[in-house]
Image (spheres, coloured by chain):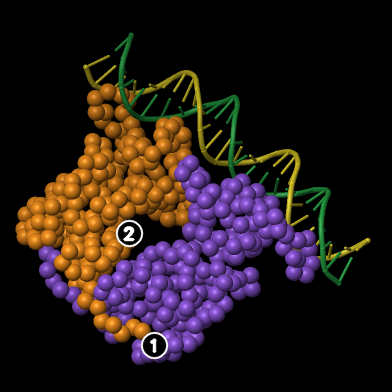
Chain colours: A purple, B orange, C yellow, D green
DNA sequence: CCAAAAGTGTTGAGAATACACCCATGA
DNA sequence: TCATGGGTGTATTCTCAACACTTTTGG
Protein backbone atom coordinates (compact mmCIF):
# COMPACT_ATOMS: atom_id res chain seq x y z
CA UNK A 1 0.00 0.00 0.00
CA UNK A 2 2.70 2.52 -0.83
CA UNK A 3 0.40 4.91 -2.64
CA UNK A 4 -0.69 7.76 -0.44
CA UNK A 5 1.13 10.95 -1.14
CA UNK A 6 2.14 13.04 1.85
CA UNK A 7 2.89 16.71 2.22
CA UNK A 8 5.31 16.16 5.04
CA UNK A 9 8.39 18.33 5.04
CA UNK A 10 11.88 17.07 5.84
CA UNK A 11 14.35 19.02 7.94
CA UNK A 12 17.67 18.38 9.66
CA UNK A 13 18.95 19.81 12.92
CA UNK A 14 22.40 19.72 14.46
CA UNK A 15 23.12 19.53 18.16
CA UNK A 16 26.76 20.56 18.33
CA UNK A 17 28.74 20.32 21.54
CA UNK A 18 31.86 22.12 22.56
CA UNK A 19 33.87 22.02 25.77
CA UNK A 20 35.82 24.47 27.85
CA UNK A 21 37.24 24.09 31.32
CA UNK A 22 35.33 27.14 32.44
CA UNK A 23 31.81 26.39 31.15
CA UNK A 24 32.00 22.64 30.80
CA UNK A 25 29.92 21.20 27.97
CA UNK A 26 28.28 23.82 25.77
CA UNK A 27 25.80 23.58 22.92
CA UNK A 28 25.63 25.77 19.85
CA UNK A 29 22.36 27.70 19.40
CA UNK A 30 20.99 30.33 17.06
CA UNK A 31 18.43 33.00 17.72
CA UNK A 32 15.53 32.72 15.30
CA UNK A 33 14.81 35.70 13.09
CA UNK A 34 11.51 34.63 11.62
CA UNK A 35 7.92 33.77 12.29
CA UNK A 36 7.32 30.86 14.58
CA UNK A 37 9.37 31.28 17.75
CA UNK A 38 10.84 34.57 16.52
CA UNK A 39 13.80 35.66 18.71
CA UNK A 40 13.77 32.37 20.57
CA UNK A 41 16.91 30.27 20.73
CA UNK A 42 16.95 27.12 18.63
CA UNK A 43 19.18 24.37 17.33
CA UNK A 44 20.69 25.21 13.96
CA UNK A 45 19.03 23.41 11.08
CA UNK A 46 16.68 23.71 8.16
CA UNK A 47 14.95 21.98 5.31
CA UNK A 48 16.67 19.39 3.18
CA UNK A 49 17.06 20.25 -0.49
CA UNK A 50 15.65 17.95 -3.12
CA UNK A 51 18.98 16.57 -4.29
CA UNK A 52 21.29 16.76 -1.29
CA UNK A 53 22.08 14.05 1.22
CA UNK A 54 20.99 14.46 4.82
CA UNK A 55 24.53 14.87 6.04
CA UNK A 56 25.27 17.49 3.39
CA UNK A 57 22.16 19.35 4.46
CA UNK A 58 23.32 19.43 8.07
CA UNK A 59 26.78 20.64 7.17
CA UNK A 60 25.40 23.30 4.85
CA UNK A 61 22.96 24.64 7.42
CA UNK A 62 25.60 24.69 10.10
CA UNK A 63 27.96 26.63 7.92
CA UNK A 64 25.28 29.07 6.75
CA UNK A 65 23.88 29.72 10.17
CA UNK A 66 26.91 29.59 12.44
CA UNK A 67 30.03 29.45 10.29
CA UNK A 68 31.13 26.26 11.97
CA UNK A 69 32.51 23.04 10.52
CA UNK A 70 32.31 20.08 12.87
CA UNK A 71 35.01 17.46 13.15
CA UNK A 72 32.66 14.72 14.29
CA UNK A 73 29.11 14.12 13.10
CA UNK A 74 26.67 11.27 13.43
CA UNK A 75 22.95 10.80 13.10
CA UNK A 76 21.15 11.03 16.44
CA UNK A 77 17.43 10.45 16.10
CA UNK A 78 14.50 11.39 13.92
CA UNK A 79 11.80 13.44 15.56
CA UNK A 80 8.46 13.17 13.84
CA UNK A 81 5.53 13.79 16.14
CA UNK A 82 2.65 15.27 14.13
CA UNK A 83 2.51 18.55 16.05
CA UNK A 84 6.12 19.38 16.69
CA UNK A 85 5.91 22.30 14.26
CA UNK A 86 2.87 24.58 14.54
CA UNK A 87 2.88 25.45 10.84
CA UNK A 88 2.67 22.04 9.26
CA UNK A 89 3.94 18.51 9.56
CA UNK A 90 7.74 18.53 9.65
CA UNK A 91 9.94 15.61 10.54
CA UNK A 92 13.46 16.40 11.54
CA UNK A 93 16.51 14.19 11.40
CA UNK A 94 18.67 15.35 14.28
CA UNK A 95 22.44 15.03 14.08
CA UNK A 96 24.98 15.05 16.84
CA UNK A 97 28.23 16.94 16.37
CA UNK A 98 31.43 17.69 18.27
CA UNK A 99 33.79 20.60 17.87
CA UNK A 100 37.10 21.70 19.35
CA UNK A 101 35.69 24.97 20.61
CA UNK A 102 39.05 26.67 20.93
CA UNK A 103 39.47 26.56 17.18
CA UNK A 104 36.17 28.24 16.46
CA UNK A 105 36.00 31.27 18.65
CA UNK A 106 34.47 33.27 15.84
CA UNK A 107 30.80 32.57 15.47
CA UNK A 108 29.03 34.01 12.52
CA UNK A 109 26.75 36.75 13.78
CA UNK A 110 26.59 38.27 10.37
CA UNK A 111 24.90 37.68 6.98
CA UNK A 112 21.27 36.87 6.67
CA UNK A 113 21.64 34.40 9.46
CA UNK A 114 20.61 34.45 13.02
CA UNK A 115 22.63 35.33 16.04
CA UNK A 116 24.74 32.33 17.06
CA UNK A 117 26.14 31.52 20.47
CA UNK A 118 27.41 28.84 22.83
CA UNK A 119 25.37 27.97 25.91
CA UNK A 120 26.56 25.86 28.81
CA UNK A 121 24.25 22.88 29.10
CA UNK A 122 23.81 23.84 32.73
CA UNK A 123 22.25 27.18 31.77
CA UNK A 124 20.11 26.66 28.69
CA UNK A 125 17.63 29.32 27.58
CA UNK A 126 14.05 28.60 26.53
CA UNK A 127 14.06 26.74 23.26
CA UNK A 128 11.91 26.61 20.14
CA UNK A 129 9.90 23.59 18.99
CA UNK A 130 10.93 20.31 20.65
CA UNK A 131 14.54 21.39 20.73
CA UNK A 132 14.84 20.98 24.48
CA UNK A 133 14.01 17.33 24.00
CA UNK A 134 16.56 17.03 21.22
CA UNK A 135 19.31 18.45 23.38
CA UNK A 136 18.39 16.08 26.18
CA UNK A 137 18.67 13.15 23.80
CA UNK A 138 22.00 14.43 22.50
CA UNK A 139 23.45 14.83 25.98
CA UNK A 140 22.40 11.31 26.81
CA UNK A 141 24.11 10.10 23.67
CA UNK A 142 27.27 12.00 24.51
CA UNK A 143 27.36 10.63 28.04
CA UNK A 144 26.86 7.09 26.80
CA UNK A 145 29.21 7.40 23.87
CA UNK A 146 32.11 8.78 25.82
CA UNK A 147 32.18 5.52 27.75
CA UNK A 148 32.70 3.15 24.87
CA UNK A 149 34.22 5.25 22.12
CA UNK A 150 37.07 7.74 22.46
CA UNK A 151 35.05 10.73 21.26
CA UNK A 152 36.24 12.89 24.13
CA UNK A 153 39.27 13.93 22.11
CA UNK A 154 37.05 15.57 19.51
CA UNK A 155 36.20 18.14 22.17
CA UNK A 156 39.72 18.83 23.40
CA UNK A 157 42.57 20.61 21.70
CA UNK A 158 44.84 18.49 19.57
CA UNK A 159 47.41 18.53 22.35
CA UNK A 160 46.21 18.56 25.90
CA UNK A 161 47.43 17.90 29.42
CA UNK A 162 46.08 14.74 30.96
CA UNK A 163 44.12 16.65 33.54
CA UNK A 164 41.98 18.21 30.80
CA UNK A 165 40.80 14.80 29.76
CA UNK A 166 40.12 13.96 33.35
CA UNK A 167 38.07 17.11 33.86
CA UNK A 168 36.09 16.42 30.71
CA UNK A 169 35.17 12.96 31.91
CA UNK A 170 34.40 14.32 35.31
CA UNK A 171 31.94 16.73 33.69
CA UNK A 172 30.30 13.95 31.68
CA UNK A 173 30.18 10.97 33.99
CA UNK A 174 28.26 11.07 37.20
CA UNK A 175 30.52 8.87 39.24
CA UNK A 176 33.75 10.22 40.60
CA UNK A 177 36.91 9.07 39.00
CA UNK A 178 40.08 8.28 40.83
CA UNK A 179 42.94 10.22 39.29
CA UNK A 180 45.43 7.39 39.52
CA UNK A 181 43.18 4.68 38.21
CA UNK A 182 41.79 6.82 35.42
CA UNK A 183 45.20 7.63 34.03
CA UNK A 184 46.36 4.04 34.38
CA UNK A 185 43.35 2.84 32.43
CA UNK A 186 43.47 5.41 29.64
CA UNK A 187 47.22 5.08 29.15
CA UNK A 188 47.03 1.30 29.13
CA UNK A 189 44.84 1.55 26.02
CA UNK A 190 47.94 2.81 24.30
CA UNK A 191 46.32 5.20 21.84
CA UNK A 192 47.61 8.35 23.53
CA UNK A 193 51.11 9.55 22.86
CA UNK A 194 53.27 12.03 24.70
CA UNK A 195 54.21 14.97 22.55
CA UNK A 196 57.31 15.64 24.60
CA UNK A 197 56.09 19.14 25.38
CA UNK A 198 55.20 20.37 28.82
CA UNK A 199 52.33 22.66 29.69
CA UNK A 200 53.19 26.05 31.08
CA UNK A 201 51.47 25.88 34.43
CA UNK A 202 48.59 28.29 34.98
CA UNK A 203 49.26 29.51 38.46
CA UNK A 204 50.55 26.82 40.78
CA UNK A 205 51.58 23.26 40.44
CA UNK A 206 53.91 21.08 38.44
CA UNK A 207 53.73 21.42 34.65
CA UNK A 208 52.22 18.41 32.93
CA UNK A 209 53.17 16.38 29.91
CA UNK A 210 51.11 17.11 26.82
CA UNK A 211 49.36 14.20 25.12
CA UNK A 212 47.67 13.67 21.80
CA UNK A 213 45.26 11.11 20.49
CA UNK A 214 46.64 8.79 17.83
CA UNK A 215 43.72 7.83 15.56
CA UNK A 216 45.85 5.51 13.43
CA UNK A 217 46.88 3.51 16.46
CA UNK A 218 43.26 3.43 17.61
CA UNK A 219 42.09 1.98 14.30
CA UNK A 220 44.80 -0.67 14.50
CA UNK A 221 43.66 -1.61 17.96
CA UNK A 222 40.07 -1.90 16.74
CA UNK A 223 41.17 -4.31 14.04
CA UNK A 224 42.84 -6.43 16.68
CA UNK A 225 39.47 -6.72 18.38
CA UNK A 226 40.20 -4.18 21.08
CA UNK A 227 37.22 -2.73 22.92
CA UNK A 228 37.31 0.70 24.55
CA UNK A 229 35.35 1.04 27.74
CA UNK A 230 35.55 3.43 30.66
CA UNK B 1 16.92 30.13 5.72
CA UNK B 2 14.07 27.77 6.41
CA UNK B 3 12.10 28.66 3.32
CA UNK B 4 12.63 26.23 0.51
CA UNK B 5 9.79 23.82 0.03
CA UNK B 6 10.70 20.24 -0.71
CA UNK B 7 8.81 17.47 -2.40
CA UNK B 8 10.53 14.78 -0.41
CA UNK B 9 8.37 11.87 0.65
CA UNK B 10 8.55 10.27 4.08
CA UNK B 11 8.35 6.53 4.64
CA UNK B 12 8.96 4.08 7.45
CA UNK B 13 10.34 0.55 7.26
CA UNK B 14 10.48 -2.18 9.86
CA UNK B 15 13.25 -4.71 10.18
CA UNK B 16 11.65 -7.36 12.37
CA UNK B 17 13.66 -10.25 13.76
CA UNK B 18 12.48 -13.60 14.98
CA UNK B 19 14.39 -16.59 16.29
CA UNK B 20 14.09 -20.33 16.11
CA UNK B 21 16.55 -22.99 17.11
CA UNK B 22 16.43 -24.42 13.64
CA UNK B 23 16.96 -21.32 11.48
CA UNK B 24 18.63 -19.02 13.97
CA UNK B 25 17.83 -15.34 13.52
CA UNK B 26 15.24 -14.63 10.84
CA UNK B 27 13.95 -11.44 9.33
CA UNK B 28 10.43 -10.72 8.14
CA UNK B 29 10.12 -9.83 4.46
CA UNK B 30 7.33 -9.20 1.98
CA UNK B 31 7.26 -9.78 -1.73
CA UNK B 32 6.42 -6.59 -3.60
CA UNK B 33 3.37 -6.58 -5.79
CA UNK B 34 3.85 -3.30 -7.56
CA UNK B 35 5.97 -1.29 -9.92
CA UNK B 36 9.52 -0.71 -8.82
CA UNK B 37 11.13 -3.99 -7.76
CA UNK B 38 7.94 -5.92 -8.52
CA UNK B 39 8.11 -9.48 -7.10
CA UNK B 40 11.33 -8.69 -5.27
CA UNK B 41 11.55 -9.25 -1.53
CA UNK B 42 11.57 -6.16 0.64
CA UNK B 43 11.29 -4.94 4.19
CA UNK B 44 7.70 -4.15 5.17
CA UNK B 45 6.98 -0.45 5.28
CA UNK B 46 5.27 2.43 3.53
CA UNK B 47 4.52 6.10 3.52
CA UNK B 48 3.68 8.01 6.67
CA UNK B 49 0.21 9.55 6.79
CA UNK B 50 -0.16 13.26 7.36
CA UNK B 51 -1.42 12.99 10.91
CA UNK B 52 0.09 9.81 12.32
CA UNK B 53 3.25 9.43 14.37
CA UNK B 54 6.20 7.56 12.92
CA UNK B 55 5.78 4.68 15.31
CA UNK B 56 2.08 4.39 14.53
CA UNK B 57 2.92 4.31 10.85
CA UNK B 58 5.34 1.43 11.37
CA UNK B 59 2.87 -0.56 13.41
CA UNK B 60 0.09 0.06 10.91
CA UNK B 61 2.17 -1.00 7.93
CA UNK B 62 3.40 -4.10 9.71
CA UNK B 63 -0.11 -5.14 10.56
CA UNK B 64 -1.46 -4.41 7.08
CA UNK B 65 1.33 -6.15 5.26
CA UNK B 66 2.19 -9.08 7.48
CA UNK B 67 -0.43 -9.36 10.22
CA UNK B 68 2.25 -9.12 12.87
CA UNK B 69 2.37 -7.08 16.08
CA UNK B 70 5.84 -6.71 17.51
CA UNK B 71 6.58 -6.80 21.22
CA UNK B 72 9.69 -4.66 20.95
CA UNK B 73 10.21 -1.68 18.67
CA UNK B 74 12.79 1.08 18.50
CA UNK B 75 13.97 3.55 15.92
CA UNK B 76 17.04 2.32 14.07
CA UNK B 77 18.29 4.86 11.54
CA UNK B 78 17.03 7.21 8.87
CA UNK B 79 18.09 6.44 5.34
CA UNK B 80 17.97 9.44 3.05
CA UNK B 81 20.40 9.20 0.16
CA UNK B 82 18.97 11.11 -2.81
CA UNK B 83 18.78 8.10 -5.12
CA UNK B 84 17.68 5.31 -2.87
CA UNK B 85 14.27 5.21 -4.60
CA UNK B 86 14.26 5.34 -8.42
CA UNK B 87 10.89 7.09 -8.60
CA UNK B 88 11.54 10.17 -6.51
CA UNK B 89 13.25 11.37 -3.35
CA UNK B 90 12.10 9.28 -0.40
CA UNK B 91 13.62 9.27 3.02
CA UNK B 92 12.84 6.31 5.20
CA UNK B 93 12.93 6.06 8.95
CA UNK B 94 13.87 2.46 9.66
CA UNK B 95 12.67 0.76 12.82
CA UNK B 96 13.99 -2.32 14.54
CA UNK B 97 11.56 -4.86 15.94
CA UNK B 98 11.62 -8.16 17.79
CA UNK B 99 8.98 -10.87 17.87
CA UNK B 100 8.49 -14.17 19.61
CA UNK B 101 8.19 -16.12 16.38
CA UNK B 102 6.48 -19.08 17.91
CA UNK B 103 3.45 -16.95 18.69
CA UNK B 104 3.07 -15.70 15.15
CA UNK B 105 3.27 -18.71 12.91
CA UNK B 106 0.45 -17.36 10.78
CA UNK B 107 1.72 -14.73 8.39
CA UNK B 108 -0.80 -12.80 6.41
CA UNK B 109 -0.54 -13.99 2.83
CA UNK B 110 -3.98 -12.73 2.09
CA UNK B 111 -5.80 -9.41 1.49
CA UNK B 112 -4.41 -6.79 -0.79
CA UNK B 113 -1.03 -7.26 0.76
CA UNK B 114 2.08 -8.90 -0.45
CA UNK B 115 3.33 -12.35 0.28
CA UNK B 116 5.05 -12.35 3.68
CA UNK B 117 7.71 -14.73 4.94
CA UNK B 118 10.57 -15.29 7.35
CA UNK B 119 14.11 -15.58 6.00
CA UNK B 120 17.10 -16.77 7.95
CA UNK B 121 19.67 -13.99 7.94
CA UNK B 122 22.13 -16.56 6.65
CA UNK B 123 20.10 -17.07 3.47
CA UNK B 124 18.68 -13.74 2.44
CA UNK B 125 17.19 -13.28 -1.04
CA UNK B 126 17.92 -10.30 -3.29
CA UNK B 127 16.33 -7.23 -1.82
CA UNK B 128 14.65 -4.10 -3.13
CA UNK B 129 16.01 -0.55 -2.73
CA UNK B 130 18.72 -0.22 -0.07
CA UNK B 131 17.05 -2.81 2.09
CA UNK B 132 20.09 -5.04 2.22
CA UNK B 133 21.94 -2.20 3.88
CA UNK B 134 19.08 -1.66 6.32
CA UNK B 135 19.15 -5.27 7.39
CA UNK B 136 22.89 -5.13 7.86
CA UNK B 137 22.50 -2.11 10.10
CA UNK B 138 19.73 -3.82 12.05
CA UNK B 139 21.77 -6.97 12.59
CA UNK B 140 24.62 -4.87 13.86
CA UNK B 141 22.26 -3.15 16.26
CA UNK B 142 20.88 -6.46 17.47
CA UNK B 143 24.34 -7.89 18.05
CA UNK B 144 25.41 -4.82 19.96
CA UNK B 145 22.19 -4.46 21.88
CA UNK B 146 22.05 -8.01 23.11
CA UNK B 147 25.28 -7.34 25.00
CA UNK B 148 24.10 -4.49 27.15
CA UNK B 149 20.34 -4.85 27.30
CA UNK B 150 18.35 -8.02 27.95
CA UNK B 151 16.49 -7.93 24.64
CA UNK B 152 17.19 -11.56 23.95
CA UNK B 153 14.08 -12.54 25.86
CA UNK B 154 11.89 -10.72 23.37
CA UNK B 155 12.87 -13.38 20.86
CA UNK B 156 12.33 -16.42 23.06
CA UNK B 157 9.14 -17.96 24.35
CA UNK B 158 7.88 -16.62 27.63
CA UNK B 159 9.20 -19.73 29.34
CA UNK B 160 12.35 -21.28 28.03
CA UNK B 161 15.07 -23.73 29.03
CA UNK B 162 18.38 -22.12 29.78
CA UNK B 163 20.01 -23.75 26.81
CA UNK B 164 17.74 -21.82 24.46
CA UNK B 165 19.12 -18.57 25.75
CA UNK B 166 22.60 -19.92 25.38
CA UNK B 167 21.99 -20.96 21.79
CA UNK B 168 20.52 -17.56 21.00
CA UNK B 169 23.60 -15.80 22.32
CA UNK B 170 25.81 -18.26 20.52
CA UNK B 171 24.04 -17.32 17.29
CA UNK B 172 24.47 -13.61 17.95
CA UNK B 173 27.91 -13.25 19.48
CA UNK B 174 31.01 -14.23 17.64
CA UNK B 175 33.06 -15.42 20.55
CA UNK B 176 32.36 -18.78 22.07
CA UNK B 177 30.68 -18.84 25.40
CA UNK B 178 31.49 -21.24 28.17
CA UNK B 179 28.31 -22.97 29.30
CA UNK B 180 29.19 -22.82 32.96
CA UNK B 181 30.33 -19.24 33.05
CA UNK B 182 27.47 -18.01 30.91
CA UNK B 183 24.84 -19.45 33.21
CA UNK B 184 26.65 -18.20 36.31
CA UNK B 185 26.73 -14.71 34.88
CA UNK B 186 23.15 -14.53 33.67
CA UNK B 187 21.75 -16.05 36.83
CA UNK B 188 23.81 -13.74 39.03
CA UNK B 189 21.94 -10.80 37.50
CA UNK B 190 18.91 -12.12 39.29
CA UNK B 191 16.23 -11.15 36.78
CA UNK B 192 15.48 -14.70 35.68
CA UNK B 193 13.18 -16.86 37.73
CA UNK B 194 12.62 -20.57 37.67
CA UNK B 195 9.05 -21.46 36.80
CA UNK B 196 9.31 -24.79 38.59
CA UNK B 197 8.44 -26.61 35.40
CA UNK B 198 10.75 -28.97 33.58
CA UNK B 199 11.11 -29.26 29.84
CA UNK B 200 10.06 -32.52 28.26
CA UNK B 201 13.31 -33.60 26.67
CA UNK B 202 13.38 -33.75 22.90
CA UNK B 203 15.20 -36.97 22.29
CA UNK B 204 18.01 -37.54 24.70
CA UNK B 205 19.36 -35.85 27.74
CA UNK B 206 18.22 -34.63 31.09
CA UNK B 207 15.15 -32.37 31.16
CA UNK B 208 15.95 -28.79 32.01
CA UNK B 209 14.40 -26.26 34.34
CA UNK B 210 12.25 -23.67 32.64
CA UNK B 211 13.03 -20.01 33.25
CA UNK B 212 11.26 -16.75 32.60
CA UNK B 213 12.38 -13.16 32.43
CA UNK B 214 11.09 -10.91 35.21
CA UNK B 215 10.75 -7.40 33.76
CA UNK B 216 9.63 -5.90 37.06
CA UNK B 217 12.75 -7.15 38.79
CA UNK B 218 14.85 -5.88 35.92
CA UNK B 219 13.40 -2.39 36.23
CA UNK B 220 14.09 -2.42 39.96
CA UNK B 221 17.67 -3.38 39.30
CA UNK B 222 18.03 -0.55 36.81
CA UNK B 223 16.84 1.92 39.41
CA UNK B 224 19.50 0.64 41.78
CA UNK B 225 22.08 1.57 39.17
CA UNK B 226 22.58 -1.94 37.90
CA UNK B 227 24.21 -2.33 34.51
CA UNK B 228 23.63 -5.35 32.30
CA UNK B 229 26.60 -6.46 30.24
CA UNK B 230 27.57 -9.74 28.64
C1' DC C 1 59.89 26.17 52.53
C1' DC C 2 55.01 25.61 51.71
C1' DA C 3 50.94 24.75 48.87
C1' DA C 4 49.24 22.94 44.75
C1' DA C 5 49.02 20.02 40.97
C1' DA C 6 51.36 16.13 38.47
C1' DG C 7 53.23 11.59 38.44
C1' DT C 8 53.90 6.64 40.15
C1' DG C 9 54.08 2.01 43.14
C1' DT C 10 51.60 -1.40 45.60
C1' DT C 11 48.16 -4.19 47.66
C1' DG C 12 43.80 -6.66 48.55
C1' DA C 13 39.03 -7.83 46.93
C1' DG C 14 36.22 -9.60 43.64
C1' DA C 15 35.21 -10.94 38.97
C1' DA C 16 36.23 -13.64 34.89
C1' DT C 17 38.14 -17.94 33.19
C1' DA C 18 39.22 -22.65 32.82
C1' DC C 19 38.46 -27.14 34.14
C1' DA C 20 36.29 -31.07 36.19
C1' DC C 21 32.82 -33.63 37.74
C1' DC C 22 27.94 -35.27 38.86
C1' DC C 23 22.87 -35.97 37.50
C1' DA C 24 18.61 -37.34 34.89
C1' DT C 25 16.78 -39.04 30.89
C1' DG C 26 15.78 -42.11 26.43
C1' DA C 27 17.13 -45.87 23.85
C1' DT D 1 24.34 -49.23 30.84
C1' DC D 2 25.66 -45.87 27.65
C1' DA D 3 25.30 -41.59 25.20
C1' DT D 4 23.49 -37.06 25.57
C1' DG D 5 22.53 -32.86 27.40
C1' DG D 6 21.63 -30.43 31.98
C1' DG D 7 23.55 -28.78 36.43
C1' DT D 8 27.24 -27.36 39.78
C1' DG D 9 31.93 -26.75 42.60
C1' DT D 10 36.36 -24.67 42.72
C1' DA D 11 41.25 -23.20 41.84
C1' DT D 12 43.70 -19.82 39.26
C1' DT D 13 44.22 -15.58 36.82
C1' DC D 14 43.39 -11.02 36.11
C1' DT D 15 41.28 -6.61 36.61
C1' DC D 16 40.05 -2.79 39.38
C1' DA D 17 39.62 0.14 43.32
C1' DA D 18 41.88 2.21 47.23
C1' DC D 19 45.66 4.30 49.27
C1' DA D 20 50.16 6.40 49.92
C1' DC D 21 54.00 8.53 48.55
C1' DT D 22 57.26 11.36 45.45
C1' DT D 23 58.23 15.20 42.11
C1' DT D 24 58.10 19.79 40.17
C1' DT D 25 56.57 24.13 39.98
C1' DG D 26 55.12 29.31 41.82
C1' DG D 27 54.92 32.33 45.51
Residue lying at 38% horizontally and 41% vertically, measured from the top left: B173
Q: Position of residue C8 (x, y in %)?
A: 74, 46
Direction from residue B6 to residue B87 in the image, left or right? left
- The quarter of the picture where residue B63 lies is bottom left
Q: Chain of mark 1?
A: A
Q: Position of residue A122 (x, y in %)?
A: 55, 75
Q: Position of residue A187 (x, y in %)?
A: 63, 49
Task: Say which quadrant the N terminus of chain B sits in.
Answer: bottom left
- The quarter of the picture where residue A135 lies is bottom left
Secondary structure of residue under mark 2: strand
Direction from residue A126 to residue B34 in the image, left or right? left
Residue B58 visible in image: no
Depth check: give the residue in front, A107 or A140.
A107
Depth check: give the residue in front, A46 or B50.
A46
Q: Chain of mark 2?
A: B
Quick one: label 2, few (<14), some, or many (20+) residues within 10 Å?
A: many
State whether residue B75 is above or below residue A52.
above
Label 1 near label 2: C-beta < 8 Å? no
Depth check: give the residue in front, B79 or B165.
B79
Q: Position of residue A156 (x, y in %)?
A: 58, 64
Quick one: label 1, few (<14), some, or many (20+) residues within 10 Å?
A: some
Residue carrying label 2:
B76
Task: Say which quadrant the C terminus of chain B sits in.
Answer: top left
Secondary structure of residue under mark 1: loop
Residue carrying label 1:
A37
Residue lying at 40% horizontally and 72% vertically, measured from the top left: A59
State whether residue B136 is above or below residue B197.
below
Amino acid sequence: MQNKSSGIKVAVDAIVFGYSKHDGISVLLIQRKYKPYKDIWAIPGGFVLEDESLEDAVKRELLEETGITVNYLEQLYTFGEPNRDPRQRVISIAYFGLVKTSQYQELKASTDAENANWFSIKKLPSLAFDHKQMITAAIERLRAKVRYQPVGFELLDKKFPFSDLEKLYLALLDKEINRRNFSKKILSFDFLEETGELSKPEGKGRPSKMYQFNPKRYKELLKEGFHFEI
